[in-house]
Image: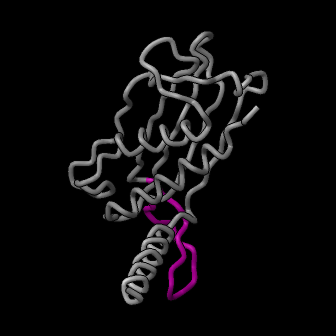
Amino acid sequence: MRQLLHLFAFVFIMMLTACTTAPTKDITVDAEADPKASFSGFKTYAWLASAQIVFDPEGQWEPRNVDIDAEVQLMINNELRKRGITEVRGNPDMLVAYAAGVDMTALGLKQDPETKEKLLANIPKAALVVALIDADTGYVVWIAEAAGQVQEQPDAATVRARLEYAIGEMFRLLPKN
């Protein structure tokens, strides 16, 4: 029994550290809210439209076994549920939209490990934008963006962890009033 408890503790610790090892230092998050919006009045939402994440047939930045659209929607759903906001089919208080893009040709400065010089290099960038829209007025009441470097051929766990981090950080910036 004691060995089983030790094994369980070991597996649990490994799961925790696996969740926190995904690189997130390069991810920046920003958000803007309408100062006149009363966020406490939003109790329900519906998806504005299904935005498609950039198509990546070679699997350069999106693992083939991960449906990024479904992952993003699930994570946004979870963040809204944490705030007591429920998804409905008709007559929502707000609409939710998101879009993502990847620029595989982005350039930036990268330090050469040998010479320590900064050189111009190809550093692909990705961004995710989430917008909350007042369903009555049609005005955007909150918009957030997360941007970061594209990870080369990431595994599914890394992609999920980076998305979860970015979306979690975005929704930390959503006013509670």
Of residues 3 and 141, the one nearer the viewer is: 3
Q: Which residue is drawn at 52% across and 61% down?
A: 108
- Does 175 appear above or below 88? below
Q: Which residue is drawn at 37% across and 28% down?
A: 50
Structure colour scheme: one colour
Residue 107 is one of the magenta-drawn residues: yes
Q: Residue at x 52, y 24 (%)?
A: 45
- Does 107 appear above or below 170? below
Residue 160 is one of the magenta-drawn residues: no
Of residues 83 and 171, the one nearer the viewer is: 83
Residue 151 in percent (x, y) is at: 40, 63
Quadrant of the rendering where the N terminus is positioned: bottom left
Range covered by the magenta-colored residues: 106-123
- Does 23 appear above or below 64? below
Residue 76 in percent (x, y) is at: 49, 40
Of residues 110 and 21, the one nearer the viewer is: 21
Residue 62 in percent (x, y) is at: 31, 54
Q: Which residue is drawn at 34% across and 64% down?
A: 154
